[in-house]
Amino acid sequence: MNYMYSKVSTATLIAFALCTNAHADQTVKIGEVAPTTGQIAHLGKDIENGARLAIDESNAKGLTIDGQKITLVLDAQDDAADPRTATQVAQKVVDDKVVAVVGHLNSGTSIPASKIYSDAGIVQISPAASNPAYTQQGFKTTYRVVATDAQQGPALANYAAKSLKVKRVAIVDDSTAYGQGLANEFEKTAKSLGLNVLSHDATNDKAVDFRAILTKIKGENPDAIMYGGMDATAGPFAKQAKQLGLRAKVLGGDGACSEKLAELAGDAADNIVCSDIGMALQKMPGGKAFAAKYEKQYGQPVQIYAPFAYDAVNIVIDAMKRANSTDPGKILAVMPNTDYKGVIGETTFDSKGDLKHGVISLYDYKAGKRTLIESVQM
């Protein structure tokens, strides 16, 4: 009798355990990689914050895939904006069994990391990488939710020629995949518009003293200087240009076009015109609401990329729902058919993983505040 009771009890316990496990939450990791140390840590943290906000909201609402409750975890990693570190971190998040990755920030890190994600069959959505080469490698895993430098460079050159009436321009880039790529795209369009490109010099993304290059450029007497690089160097570049008495406008791309640029450039910010690779936050369909909840959550304003990272996470979640699976291969299979309406607007991808309808926004700075000039549908 005791033996029979023991058998029944054991069988009941096993059945109960199986039943309980069947309904246990499944933990699903989404990777997020950006520089959270170094000169542009504030931009990397902006990406992490945007991604984390989307994760937290999904968990608060509740997510069920294939009948199972899903708890999302953000696997956030720091690549320090360094290509070698980026590949190491990419392998780490692959080993962590993430189902997709939001990242990286820089083109110079996104491109080398992309091969690792491609080899693993894991979706990579960059909220910031703009070099066209990122999606031109033949990988099925590379996506981005921003416009490219093949759109940004021409938009900036067109504005310089047609609105600023620039005739003579000098170009400087920071020798990174992003800075050099953007500068080259700008230069091609500038020449096609008949602008006189006086020179094209290179510095690096760790530089702090630009006086030698700027002194040479001062002798060339340009109407504008196009600088391809991030805000950490663009700010001091513009400040030193003003200190040396250059009157030329300083033109920059999205990496420079942050809220922090005004602080880094000081009163020289009023001489800067820059472009961004998406719709202005205040013009985004969900921009106003997103800005409010971001500031409430983190106690600071959006820098640039947070809404793009937020939507990138939600696009992954949308793909899970459409695939009815958390399997990375099945998520990848439904990505080409993405049609997601989020904070930044409607996101659909072309065959390479680029946005079908990119937007470039142009800004200047008035009394230290970034001010929208216009947005251009590309």
Image (cartoon, rainbow, N blue to C red):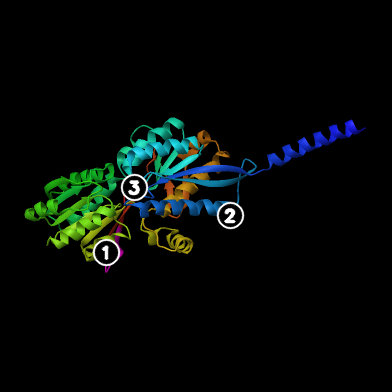
Q: Secondary structure at mark 2?
A: helix
- The mark nearer the N terminus, 3 or 1, is 3
Single out the mark in the foreground, 3 or 1: 1
Q: Secondary structure at mark 3?
A: loop
Task: Give whichever of 337, 185 is nearer the camera.
Answer: 185
Single out the mark in the foreground, 3 or 2: 2
Please tell me how many numbered marks the rendered image carries: 3
User: Which three-letter amino acid code belongs to the residue tagged 1?
Assistant: Tyr
In reply to whether residue 377 is colored magenta, the answer given is: no
- The mark nearer the N terminus, 1 or 2, is 2
Residue name at image x 53 percent, y 53 percent: 56
Residue 283 screen position, x and y as percent:
38, 60
Q: Residues within 10 Å of mark 3 (few under 14, many from 20)?
A: many
Q: Secondary structure at mark 1?
A: strand
Q: Which residue is the site of mark 2?
A: 60
Q: Main secondary structure of the magenta part?
A: strand
List the single residue furthest toward the right: 1
Q: Residues within 10 Å of mark 2 (few under 14, many from 20)?
A: few
User: Which three-letter amino acid code belongs to the residue tagged 2?
Assistant: Ala
User: Which three-letter amino acid code belongs to the residue tagged 3?
Assistant: Ala
Residue name at image x 40 percent, y 58 percent: 284
Residue name at image x 28 percent, y 66 percent: 368
Q: Which residue is the site of mark 3?
A: 147
Q: Is residue 315 left or right of residue 37?
A: right
Q: Residues within 10 Å of mark 1 (few under 14, many from 20)?
A: many
- Which range is magenta? 366-374
Q: Which residue is the site of mark 1?
A: 365
